[in-house]
Amino acid sequence: MKTDSLNVIIVGGGGYIGFHTGLSLWERGHKVTLFDIIEPNRIWISRSSIFTQTTKSAPDTPRTIVYYGNGEGNRNQLKFIEGSLLDPDALSAAFFEADCVIHCASYGMSGKEQMPTEWTKTELVNVRGTENILKACLSEGVCGLVYTSTYNVVFGGQEIIDGDESLPYFPLHQHVDHYSRTKAIAEQFVLLTDGLCQNKNKNAPRAPLRTCALRLAGVMGLGETRHLPRIVKSLDLMKFRYGYGDSLVQFVTLKNVVQAHVKAAERLLSHPDSLGGHAYFISDGVPINNFEFFRPLMQGLGYTYPNIVLPMWLIWLMVYLIQFTHSLCSKIHPSLTFTPMLTPAEVYKTGVTHYFSCQKARMHFGYYPENPNDISDAIQYFKEDKEKSGKKTEINSLTNIISVCIVFIIVIFLLFL
């Protein structure tokens, strides 16, 4: 199939990765529909080439927003359709006549979402939602599906140095979080579906569905709303470091996330035999210590880089006590729950060496990461925001007070042993 002009549906198109990938595909001349239960962040829209939007409100139809670009540019549509991946009928309607689907919707990635109280929703979105998308792709004759996956499908706390796609899935029962477990299940569903075909009309056979998965490192960049704001709110209390030795991890910045999704989608449609059924690790390509990665952010906002290094056993004790406290609060009353400073999975991801090669993605669809580990634009944004506010970044009070109190109690206990 030619990729001169594709009809692409992005499930999770209201999110950070989905919106910016859709915008890039649209700017390359493709027709793009963003499908999500939430609209794209208006700040992202204001920074893009989009300058107007129109809302359609026809009876008995999903709420739709049509975006327009500045100047002549792309005459294809870029639009947002409100809908849930848990609604099979909405998916089938959105996928009608689609060439390619990019599935980057998920739940349970970090913070409060990783707590056991959220595991039911995590499984519903990540597993049931992916099953619904695969069924809709097959029933509507979609040719390609790019699935946004994660390093966590093969990583669960063990050291990995320059790993590649030959690594086995991490045992499901050994994951400390349900997000990693459900993403591994969903990725296997996606890759096992590669090559299947379901025809409504036997007299008009369709091409098989071809699928691939992009296993992302931690995503960072300007406008990212999940990790960076949470880190900035915690900088007042960031007086220590941790990690097994000088541990190395990987990140992937927005520009490279978008590059990977765009190139994978176009290549999957033009050369399906090259990518179909394959998974790919995607990162900025340069391993770095977690705290060194955030050093420019800390110092740029006027904070001192922490010199105290706490032992990992103390960090583990702290996060499990925080998780226990969260579970206890949720049983007392839902309003007492809080966003934990760290979760067990986040300790693994930030304190244990694990990094992977992007060579397969480079060979199969020309992925070349640019400006590795550069979040200078995000740092500049937070600096300007801090200057405008005229005060230090606010602390996430309940979360950090609980976290600090737990650490303080542990330290006092140890001193009197």
Image: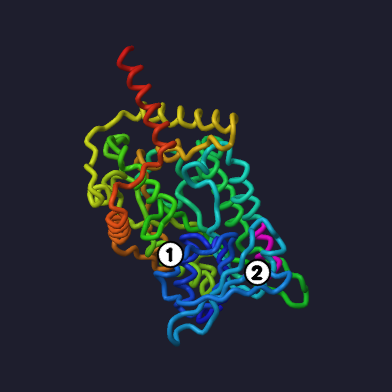
- Image disc number at residue 52: none
Q: Tell me the distance, in whole angstroms, between the alpha carbons under discs 2 and 1.
A: 26 Å
Q: Furthest residue to the top?
A: 417
Magenta stretch, residue numbers = 132-142
Q: Which mark is residue 94?
A: 2
Kind of residue at disc 1: Ile
Q: Is residue 70 left or right of residue 295?
A: right
Out of 172 and 124, give the one closest to the viewer: 124
- Judging depth in this view, the residue of 362 and 302 nearest the camera is 302
Q: Position of residue 210 (x, y in %)?
A: 58, 66
Tell me whether the residue at label 2 lies in contact with that at label 1, contact meaning CB atoms closer than 8 angstroms. no
Q: Looking at the image, is mark 2 or mark 1 earlier in the sequence? A: 1
The residue mark sitting in front, 2 or 1, is: 1
Q: Secondary structure at mark 1?
A: helix
In the rendered image, residue 129, in percent from the top left (x then y), is placed at 63, 54
Query: Would residue 137 be counted in the magenta stretch?
Result: yes
Q: Which residue is mark 1?
A: 43
Label 1 crowd (10 A; few <14 / some 14-19 / many >=20)? few
Residue 281 figure quarter: bottom left
Q: Amino acid at mark 2?
A: Ala
